[in-house]
Amino acid sequence: MGQMTSIPFLKKSQRRWLAEFTACFTAHDLEGQATATRLGATSHFGPLRVQRPFFPEGADLAHIYLLHPPGGLVGGDHLNIELEVQSSAKVLVTTPSAGKLYRNITDMSQGQTVSATIADGGVLEWLPQENILFDGATGELCSRIALYGTAIYSGWEIICLGRPEGEKPFRSGSLRQRLEITRDGSPLFIDQINFSADDAMLANRAGLADQRVTGAFVVTEDVLGNRELTAQIHAWQERINAGEAAGNPRGLVAVTQKPGVFVARLLTDKAEWARDRFQELWTQLRPAIVQRPACVPRIWRT
């Protein structure tokens, strides 16, 4: 694997890696069968690991459950995840439960860095549960995705500010979130969010519109170049924004096609609603992205 660099937001004197996990996924030809994806070399430090890969869709696409038993981060804690997807390997990575960033009583940040390298013909689906920022958390989340050749990345991130269902709002704290995607070394997509709990943009209609759950789903394909798929996505968007989705708690979605990158964003006050909407979109997109129907990870049903 190539050398990965640490999250840029942390000063050198503040770095404290709570846990680290690295993995390499390889592709192998099976006699008389399709290519098989295998979990190759791995290493871990601290309570961050996977048990074993699952293959509910066949040998060529691995489902990986990334486990962090403590379940949450306090001040100074950081998760570092490094993934290498080699040529023709296909991987879906998810988590069994929401990530939690607890109230920070230190002068050190807390957060997560994901670094992924995807070789020509490789596919990475990054579909974690949401990250919850508790009141007083100072979260820093960074994802760097390096694509080569025809590699594909399909991934979402959902952020919950506080726990409105439990009447525990996000009244203090901050979030810095950054996604960087390159292809063959050139920038393809950069997205960054920086705010504090008292920022006016949280209530502003041009910001989070007083919603406490926000998410982005990014696919490195020209999705809206497919006429039939475009019609399906626009119908999905119009149905939700018209308030016709079952149990819609004032949620909104928007989609954008940039050169080589499709982006869907949502705002709501319910994490479950956000997960359900992105899963609906994933179900529509997946046949065009990885040439197979959606196969819901078993762990989502538990």
Image (cartoon, grey):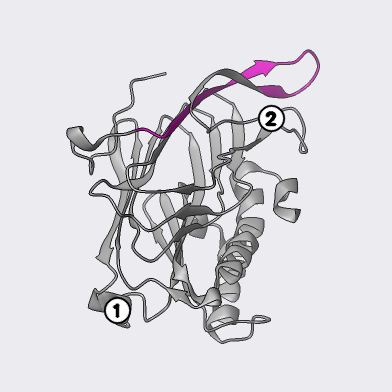
Name the residue at the top extreme. 31
Specify the amino acid type for callout 2: Pro
* Whether residue 253 is visible: no
Stretch in magenta: 17-37
Q: Rate crowding at label 1 as few (under 14), some (14 to 19) or many (20 or more) other CA atoms within 10 Å.
A: few
Q: Quadrant where the N terminus lies?
A: top left
Q: Name the residue that disc number 2 marks.
A: 53
Q: Specify the label residue 206 is tagged with.
A: 1
> Mark 2 packing: few (<14 Cα in 10 Å), some, or many (20+)?
some
- Distance between the alpha carbons at the discs numbered 2 and 1: 42 Å
Which of 58/289 is in front? Answer: 58
Locate residue 99, reporting x and y percent: 51, 51
Placement of 127 over or under 53, stated as above or below: below
Q: Which of 111 and 61 is in front in this view?
A: 111
* Vertical comparison of 53 with 275: above or below: above
| Residue 144, image quadrant | top left
